[in-house]
Image: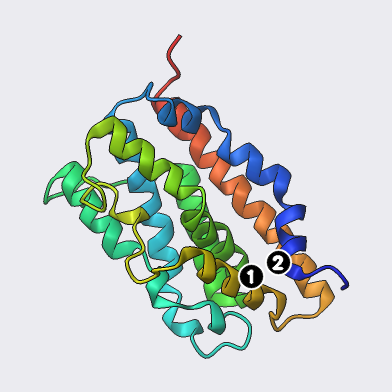
Amino acid sequence: MDTPFSTLIRTASHEQHTQAETSSFMGDLLGGRLGLDAYARYTEQLWFVYRALEEGAEALCADPVAGPFVQPELFRTTALAQDLAHLRGPGWRVGLSPLPATAAYAARVAECARDWPAGYVAHHYTRYLGDLSGGQIIRDKAERAWGFSRKGDGVRFYVFDDIPNPAAFKRAYRELLDGVNADDLEKQRIVDECKHAFAYNSAVFQQLGGEFPLSA
């Protein structure tokens, strides 16, 4: 493949990525038209997805395909737990429930972690690289809308204290993608799974939009 894989995966999934990030729910949330409860409900959904990503990571550390991507400085579940304790109180786990779309998303991540390491890479890429990029916009909006202190509870999910230079980290991550231990056919399957990952995200946003309808 003449095109670097990091470029291929980004351009091939661009349409699905755009659909996910321009969902009605996210537009309303970032536009300040939804309350703190919507932000908290969204954060709850993230917890289920990242739990699946990170519970499956340990078994993949030595895998030749997924292993290089398992980097603890990216892990988010601890930060999400801190945010949810702030948003929902110390008993935040009581009554915590995934939306059906979230449950399906987390189940697919867990399945890939268990049975298909290359597919896990697709989900790893769509989540963590997005957190280091567009996720920072959400952080900024949340700080402004609800008065969270910078790097404080409520937005810890978006703060990567162990990655002092996100731009350099993303460059190194793309180099990992370019060198992924997979042939061209498997790379195409990773691209296809990446598209599916964005579709799962879009489905979560759609269901969140059903819980928090747009203002008229």
In the rendered image, residue 26, in percent from the top left (x then y), is placed at 48, 33
Which quadrant would residue 12 be assigned to in this image?
A: bottom right
Q: Is residue 21 left or right of residue 78?
A: right
Q: Amino acid at mark 2?
A: Ser
In the rendered image, residue 129, in percent from the top left (x then y), is placed at 54, 60
Which quadrant would residue 64 be assigned to in this image?
A: bottom right
Which residue position is annotated with label 2? 6
In the rendered image, residue 106, in percent from the top left (x then y), is placed at 47, 57
Residue at horizontal 37 percent and vertical 25 percent from the top? 32
Residue at horizontal 30 percent and vertical 30 percent from the top? 145
Where's the N terminus, which quadrant?
A: bottom right
Residue 163, disc: none
Which residue position is annotated with label 1? 174
**The furthest residue to the left:** 90
Q: Is residue 13 left or right of residue 210?
A: right
Which quadrant would residue 139 be assigned to in this image?
A: top left
Q: Point out the tag, 2 or 1, that comes first from the N-terminus.
A: 2
Is disc 1 placed on a helix, strand or loop?
helix
Asked if the residue at tag 1 contacts the one at tag 2, i.e. Cβ–Cβ closer than 8 Å, the answer is: yes
Q: Amino acid at mark 1?
A: Arg
Q: Is residue 178 left or right of residue 98?
A: right
In the rendered image, residue 156, in percent from the top left (x then y), is placed at 28, 55
128 vs 162, nearest the viewer = 162
Q: Residues within 10 Å of mark 1 (few under 14, many from 20)?
A: some
195 vs 14, nearest the viewer = 14
Disc 2 and disc 1: Cα gap in Å? 5 Å
Q: Residues within 10 Å of mark 2 (few under 14, many from 20)?
A: some
**The furthest residue to the top:** 216
